[in-house]
Image (cartoon, grey):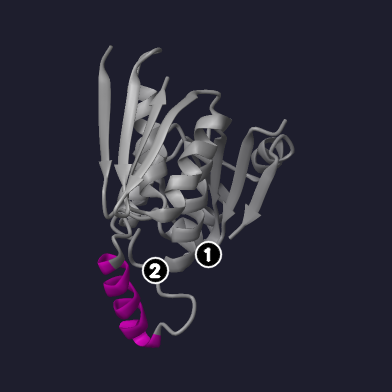
Amino acid sequence: MPEIKVDCTNQTCPVPLVETRKALRKAKEGDVVEVTGTHPASKKEIPMAVKALGLELMDVQEKDGVWKIRIRR
Amino acid sequence: MGNKATIIVHSGDMDKIYSALIVANGALAMGMEVSLYFTFWGLQRLKKGALEKGPLSKMNMLGLGKWMVKRRMKKAGVASLERLLQDFRELGGKILACDMTMEVMGMKKEDLRDDLISEYCAVGTYITEARESSVTLFI
């Protein structure tokens, strides 16, 4: 199963949210999108978008101010 | 009803164009449909080469304030208006242009970035879209 990686490190609002959505649109059903970033609000808001889109939030991790969010389309 | 946002972009000020595009892109990213209805000073920003040309709505100080804000935005990693507009289109956002403004301001289709504009229309189109929207803003 392909895993699509999106790097939004040092990007601010609304780029992490928008790049996540762009990647999810390109992904096929079952694909996993992994977004990495540092913008604090996006760590909360990407999961909100995942919920609104009816997709599966697999995992949210943070280490030293860098978060990783995994989503299954 | 409920899955759509319709925004009137009346101001051509740089900071307000940012507000409109950020809200619009956020809504698209969260799965909503979005229409931006550009009118009056907002529509000026859709002229070729004019997107980034708006002044700051407050403390523009003949462009000095804008320059300082732009510099801080760059440092903070804020995307350019052009990038936000391209993202808006890529995520399926719709741009409507007010034809009355075009007539009043003497603008022609060839003066505008026609490739970005889905429709040239009037208030009836705006209301048709706005009445089925759960989010409507006037910026």
The crowding category of the residue bearing disc 1, from other C-alpha atoms within 10 Å (few below 14, some 14 to 19, many at least 20), is many
Let me know if residue B110 appears in the view.
no
Q: How many marks?
A: 2
| Prevailing secondary structure class for the magenta stretch in the rendered image | helix
Q: Which residue is mark 2?
A: B54
Residue type (three-letter) at the residue carrying disc 2: Gly
In the image, what residue type sits under mark 1? Ser
* The residue stretch that appears in magenta: B61-75
Q: Chain of mark 2?
A: B
| Residue positioned 55% across, 24% down in the render | A54
Question: In what element is the residue under mark 1?
Answer: loop
Verify CB contact (< 8 Å) between mark 2 and mark 1.
yes
Badge 1: chain ID: B
In this rendering, the answer to whether B102 lies above or below A22 is below
Residue B88: image x %, image y %?
Answer: 41, 41
Alpha carbons under labels 2 and 1: distance apart: 9 Å
Which of the pair A64/B65 is nearer the observer? A64
Residue named by callout 1 = B11
State the residue at coordinates (58%, 60%): B139
Q: What percent of the width, then of the height, locates residue A60?
A: 41, 37
Quadrant (top left/top right/bottom left/bottom right) for the N terminus of chain B:
top right
Q: Is residue A71 above or below residue A48?
A: above
Residue A23 location in percent, x, y?
33, 29
